[in-house]
Structure formats: structure tokens, C-alpha cells
Image: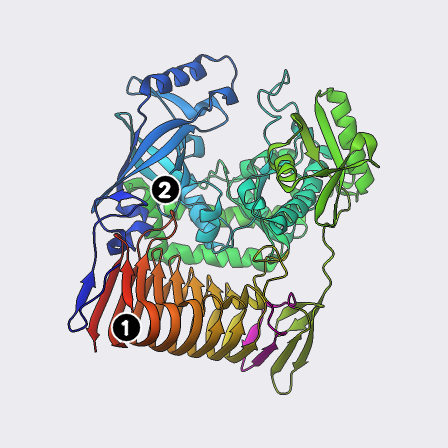
Amino acid sequence: MIRLNPSFLVILFLSQNIFSECSFKTSDYIKELDSPSYIKSIDVEIPDSKKWSKNLLKITLDKSSNINPKYRDMFKSNIIINYDFGSCKYSARVRISGDWKDHVRFSNGKITSSLDIKLHEGNILNAVRFKLLIPETRNGINEVLGSLILKELGFISPETFLVKVDVNNSQDTYLFQENAAKEMLERNFRREGPIFEGNEDLLWSFQNFKTMELENVSLSKLSNDSWANKGQTSTIIATQAFLELQKTYLEYGLHKKRAANNNLNNNFKNYGFILLAMNGVHALYPHNRKFYFSALDQDFEPIYYDGDLRLDLNLALGSLKRDVDLESFSKNVDPKIVDEYILKLESMLVKEATENNFLDRVMNDNKAKIFFSDAIEQIIKNIGTLKLNFLDLKIDNELNEVRGEDVIFDSYFERLKEKKISKFDIYSDIKLENNLFYISNSADKNNFIQVSSSDLVKIISDNTYNKRRAELISSDTKLENIQASKLDFMGGSIFYSHELSLFVDSQSSKIIIDQNKPNGWLIINGALIENWSIIFNGTTPIDSLSSVQRFNSFGLTGCLNIYNSIVKDIDIYVNNGQCEDSVNIINSSGNINSMTINNAYADALDIDFSKIDIYELNVKNAKNDCFDVSGGTYSISNAVLSKCGDKALSVGEKSNLNLYQASIDDANIGISSKDFSISNIQKLNLNNVNVCLEALQKKQEFGGAFLSVEKIEKCDGSYSYDDNSNIFIASKN
């Protein structure tokens, strides 16, 4: 903690941070640390090099074609990232990555392999879990460009680039790819939520079965059990989504070798279409697929993974028709969206920014520039080929007939019986009563046993219960029955719970919401809201939130929520919001004339992954933060904030805030800039504030922050910063 001399310009800085050991201050290089072009190389030091090399040798000598899981032990390591402007050293754990032996090779007289790395501290481009892959295992620059294209088209895609790597003094080029985790979701502007994948446990080295022999009984699993274990609401969301996904995998098993897609939404069908055009059918096989479940949308989204892409090749239609259920990928594809893909791909050809973005990720290889244009042109050509051939595609009635769920479930049991799999329990029903979970074994469906939340999560993530392999499937289960209504609104919709009453007056462009119970909520989704007034009247303040977690089963933290919408010249008034956030705005853009919030139970206004301008912000009496933003760009012309229980303005997780003037009265912290955020303030007046300004790194996946103030008219409190952050004050009266 430091107090400033009020009479002259001040710049605050020190040297290092508990999150990292860097030779530079991370807040000085916020832009550079977000780009792979500034990474010169990565060094991987494995102290127990003898044991590591011995483990690799065992893999190469093993007679099986795949890598046996018993060789996937974790090793302590140090990771050094060398930038143009300095270096960082982090402790980590490393293990071999990959399923097949192409992930192990001889190089320069040494055995090298693809690596799976988990950093204990620090990050690389916000990632704390990532792979360093032998490039040939993913077709090198095809994977880099393919990941970039999919992200440009709006799909969740991992950060991917080529980089020079030294592993225990053995130098080579590797493919960096972040893992499907919280950090990747947030990089793609999604809230943290359940991630699922095809379960490969039965596919390699399971008992005495051959590789892939059990493909038609392999289902799905939860990847991020830590999220599901955060609370009962997380467990409910993850389990309910898991049961829905299981049906798709059960259907695939019934259809045998076809990549059946009938149970998935249109977003997946569009995803499947573009992957086929990129020669990425490998990513569409169920055991390679990864999924994100959006509680906000109550739907799944694909996560790109392992497409084995060949972007510059013509389609082999013969093998596609033989190996893939083309009908399931094509019959619900929206032609308008496909045409949009073509337009976006054509725009990439003429945008230098897109090409440079790619070249930065392949170390500016001379051949890469030619590959960039050739590959995109070929993808566009392949899309045209697919469109023409889909018109003549014959429907396989046997594969595409509607199957009853009983048939799907019964056939699964038949296949298990045929394979004679031992020590394998199937739990075929689940229920939630009095906040307790119960499951029943398929061998005795009427006998329900109580399981803890952690045991339930272990079943859906690790497939184990009572030291036996366990699988959970259920044909028709709703763990919660939330009463809500929906109506069309301004090109989108309003979805609201029955714990509030709603009045929408189109003539006066006014929405009036009266909360009847503290857990009443409303969300405006996908709308264009222009010149409307929204008034939210909450209930009488209470001492505790009704939910055990900060969000409900729809992933909503706010009483009034605006999602995936455009706002223009709107006014919002909220009183007595009894939710974690009185107002929560997510993935939206536009401007707000005035925002007035009084008597917020916790945070008054929370905005995530958005670009919002607010002209007048007035908040009074919030038990936590008055204003809290993350992952976006925000501006405020004038803010009057009083009686903020914690922070008046909290700016976090790679946000940019421009604030012209603010009057802050009675808060613990005036302005907090965190985690690679940049806050620029013109005028400040602070009264009865303990910490006037704060700049710090809070989370491992980020770095320090920058906070600049042109003029502080009054501040009697202190100033706080960490070693990786900067506070700049031009003048102080």
C-alpha cells in the first residue's frame, strides 16, 4: 500500500508479481502478450530427464499402435517463454500428448513427443493448459489456418500457432494449441460452463478389446468436473446437459459407422457442413468431438478439435458418402448461412489483417502466404461442390427414420451384452428430491440410491462409482421444472420467470417489470432495442439470496438480463434488484442514455463481453460493486456512484474503460483495474473512499493492469497496486 504526494505527476510501478517470474512488467506489454507474433521460443525443462526419456523409449518399444494410458505420468517441469522484450519462467507439469504413436518420433538423435502442459503459475496468451504438438500430427499450417477460419465464422476455436520449442536441449518446431477449458471459452466470449467430449476410455487399451472395437458403446463424458462441482446449480446444469448429449451418442452407436447428427442443433449442422468443406471429417467422429453447453441458450455449441484438416485439397466425395452420414449434416443446413460463410471467406482473401493474423501464427513462412489464398479459394470451391451434390443426395430411409427412445436405449444394452463387458454398471434413471440426488441401477430400476453431488459428477466425468465403471443414461429426465414464459420482442425474444409480472407497451416503447419473489428474472435475447425504457421494480430487500449459487439453471446472474442484443438510446431504471446482479448485459453492443440502479442486493450493473457506451450512470446503495465489467470495451460520460459496498468501478479481464467524469461517494475502492485491463479516466472526485485507485493481477490467466487518471479533484484514501501494474496520475488537487 502506498500514499501519493498530491502535488505532482505520479507514476507507480515495481518489478514482479507473485503470479509469475518475468523480466518485465506485464502491464507494459498488454497488447504484445495477446499476440503469438511476439513469442520467439518456448523452453521446456524437465529435471527428471532420464525418467522422461525412459518413458518415451517404452512407448516406442510397445507393440500396440496407440499410446497406452499407463505412459501418461505427469512430470515436474519449468516453462520459459522468450519474448522479443524479455522472458517469463513458470513451474508446470508435463506429460505426453496424443493417442497414436505419430506423437512420438526421433529427431536429431533423440526421441521427442507431443506434450500436454499445465502451468501452475502464469500463462501463455491467457492459456494455462495447452499442448505442444508435433506439427505433422495436425497437418501443420492447415490446423493453424483452419482454427483461425472457424473462429472468424463464429465457432469456438482454440488459439493455435507454430512456435520454436526447446525440450531438454532438443530444438524443434511445435504446434501450440490451448486446451478446451475456461480460458478458451472466455477468449471466445462465452461464459464458463460445462464442456463435454466423446469418451475414449473404451477405445484404446481397455481390458482385452481391440482398438476401436467398442466404438458403438462409447458415449460422452464431462471434461471440466471442477466447474460442475462448484455448487448444486452447476451440477444440475452439467448433468441435465450430459443426459441430452448421451442420447446423441446412443443414436450413433445404433447407426454404427455413420457420424449420426440427428439429435444436434442447426449450429452443429452448419459446423458439420463447413468441416466437410475443409476436409475435416476427422473432427466429426464422435470420439473426437467436444461440446460447450450454453445455459443461457439452453443449447450445445461445437468446440473445434483435431480436424486433420487438408484445406487445399478437393473433396473426395466417394469416401465422404461412404464414411459420413451426409444427410444428417445437410438436411437442416441453412442456405443463407452457407452463403454468409462464402462471403466471409471471400472477405478474408482481401483483408490484410486476416492474412497477417495467420502469418503471425506460422512464423511468417514464405510458402504460407501462397497457402493462405489457395486454401481459402479451395474451401469456397468445396462448399459449392457440397451444395451441388446435396441436391442429388438420396436419403437412406433406414438410417434416417425416427427411432423411439426405447429402441435407442434397448439396443445399447444389447450391444453391451454382446461384448460381455465386465464390471460395468448402467444407471438408467436419476431424480432430484429435497435438494438430494438419487439414481437407479438398470438392473433394479425401482430401487433409487442417494448419491452426493461429487459422486454424481464423478460418474458423468470419470465413469466411476463405488470403484466400478459406471455409465449414466436417462430417456426423459428434468432435474428442475422452472416455470417461465416467452414472447417475441424486437426481432428477438423475452424469456421470463413466473416470479415476476411483465407489461410491454409498444406504443410508449416501455417495459415494466414487477418482481413478485426475490428469484424472479427476465432475459431479453437477440433483440434490437431502440428508444425503449425498461423499468424493473424489485421486491422488498432481503438478507440472503434464494439460490445457493450466484446463477440459476439458465446461467443467469441478473434480475434484468440483456443478451446477444443491440441497444440504442435506451433508458433503464432498476430498484431493489434481489439477484447477484441487478442488471447483467452479455455479448451485446450499443449505447444507453441513462442507467439508474438503486438498492442492489449485490452488484448493481455487470457487463460481460460487450461494447457499451453509457451517457449517464447513477447507482446508489449496492451491497457489492456498483459497476463491474469484463472482457469488452466500455465508455461512460458521467457516473454518480454512492454507497458501493466494495468497488465503485471494477474493470477486469482484458477490458477497456474510458470514463470522462465520475463522482464517487462512500465506497471501499474507487476504481479497480485488473487482469490486463486498461482504464483511462479524465476527472475524478472521491469522498469517503478507503482505496481511491487500485491496479492488480487477480487471476493466473491474465497479467497486470493499467490505470490512468488525468485529474483527481479529491481523494483522501490510499492507492494500491501490484508489481506488474501501473497507475498514472497526471494531476491531483
Around disc 2, counting alpha carbons within 10 Å, would you say few (fewer than 14), some (14 to 19), or many (20 or more)?
A: many
- Looking at the picture, which amino acid does disc 2 mark? Phe
The percent position of residue 233, horizontal first and vertical second, equals 62, 51
Q: Is any part of residue 438 visible from this angle?
A: yes
**Disc 2 target residue:** 161
Give the quarter of the figure containing the C terminus: bottom left
Q: Residue at x 79, y 44 (%)?
A: 402
User: Toward the viewer: 460 or 515?
Assistant: 515
Of residues 534 and 285, the one nearer the viewer is 534
Question: What is the span of residues highlighted in magenta in the rendered image?
Answer: 518-542
Which image quadrant for residue 327? top right
Residue 720 occupies which quadrant of the picture? Answer: bottom left
Vertical placement of residue 206 versus 166, above or below:
above
Residue at the disc numbered 1: 716
Q: Is residue 317 visible?
A: no
Q: Residue at x 62, y 26 (%)?
A: 202
Is residue 266 positioned above or below 207 on the image?
below
